Image (spheres, grey):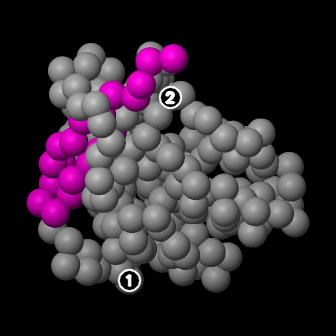
Amino acid sequence: MAPELWTSFSVAAGWTIHAAASEEGITKIRIEGEAGSPRNDAHPLLTRARTQLAEYFRGERRSFDLPVDLKGTPFELTVWRALEQIPYGETISYAELARRCGSPQAFRAVGRANGKNPIAIVVPCHRVITSRGTLGGYRAGVAYKRWLLELEARTAKASSSSSRSTVNPIFSQYTLAGLTS
């Protein structure tokens, strides 16, 4: 089995992204923290991920066209696949995610699986909030989750001038908490 290859890049002021790929697809996307090794900034899949993430951060991309190589328990894989079905600019609660996974009472287990998602942003775990409408947690920190949701809300709102917006209005109350675009 070939080792994961890593790259790191800046997509916005204050945002360092670390991405890893196997022969099958993207295996990790981390915000901040440390990258693994070995590095390969020219790997075609990592180059594609870097390009698509930059487009996302500029508000030009709403979905990703990247193969992913997710490794987890059957339950975690179910949760992560359900995350991929949450549309850009929308949010759901942990309880709703549990229902969509076929385990309506397992919202805490769904929250744990959501927190273990190894491919941030591309597998959009940031789109899951609490039933009370608060943000809940985020591995990189709640300020980053807030920023991602604000980005999607602004982009969705800007493009909805001629169509109906589906953005959850709860995010209008949040600021970028010191993170800049």
Rendered image quadrant of residue 157 = bottom left
Mark nearer the N terminus (2 vs 1): 2
Q: Secondary structure at mark 1?
A: helix
Residue depicted at 17% across the width and 43% down the height: 9
Look at the image and give the residue range highlighted in magenta.
1-19
Q: Which residue is mark 1?
A: 173
| Residue situated in front as seen by the camera: 75 or 36 | 36
Residue 172 location (% of width, % of height): 38, 77
Q: Is residue 171 shown above or below 118?
A: below
Q: Is residue 167 magenta?
A: no
The image's mark for residue 68 is: 2
Left or right, 136 with respect to 61, comes to right
Q: Is residue 152 shown above or below 180?
A: above
Q: What amino acid does circle 2 point to?
A: Val
Residue 85 can be seen, yes or no: no
Residue 96 location (% of width, % of height): 73, 61
Residue 86 can be seen, yes or no: yes
Task: Decide whether the magenta segment is chiefly helix, strand or loop.
Answer: strand
Rendered image quadrant of residue 65 = top left
